[in-house]
Image (cartoon, rainbow, N blue to C red):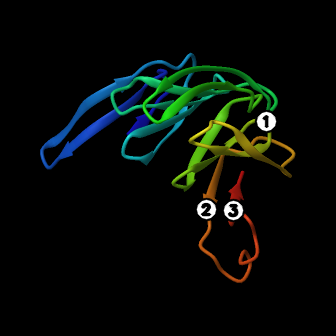
Amino acid sequence: MSASWDKTVRMWKLSQTGGTCILTISKDEAAVWTVLQPKVDLIVTGSADKTIKLFLPNGNLVKKLTGTSESLLLTCLQKREFIQYFLVGHSDVVRDIAKLNDEEILSCANDATIRRWSLRSGECLETLYGHPNFIYRFVLCVENSHVKDSYFKVMFYL
């Protein structure tokens, strides 16, 4: 999959003779900075409109995680195993997302925070602070002597 400045996410079928776009998701209001498929039936995007969106593989929106704090605003619509929530979260451009486990993802943004989210409830479970400026990317680290006792085992890159 690819994320683009043109506000789309594209899923590609690759072959030895070339590639074909098999799905285009164009439901973001700004450039899409990152895309992740943590499960077969879930696509997650992070974009310049300060949101994280969860989609089904057919491109239908399941959840939108957005805003400036961590309180639940509205519970809307049951779709498959997920409930659509509109949440308060990042206050600036979402730059990267990563799968933490089968039930949680992490996100980072220009608001200098890293957030841990529940895929099932859409709730922001924790916010990490420490960087004084934008966080562009992060990497989950393998357990070693430096991060053995860490809760997240996350390495951050500016």
Q: Earlier in the sequence, mark 2 or mark 1?
A: 1
Question: What's the mark number on residue 155?
Answer: 3
Q: Quadrant of residue 156?
A: bottom right
- Disc 1 on helix, strand or loop? loop
CB contact under 8 Å: marks 2 and 1: no
- Disc 3 on helix, strand or loop? strand
CB contact under 8 Å: marks 2 and 3: yes
Q: Badge 1: how crowded within 10 Å, few (<14), some, or many (20+)?
A: many
Q: Quadrant of residue 140?
A: bottom right
**131 lies above or below 28:** below
Q: CA distance from mark 2 to mark 3?
A: 6 Å
Question: What's the mark number on residue 111?
Answer: 1
Name the residue at 72% across, 74% down.
147
What percent of the width, then of the height, locates residue 33?
A: 56, 34
Q: Quadrant of residue 84?
A: top right
Q: CA distance from mark 3 to mark 1?
A: 17 Å
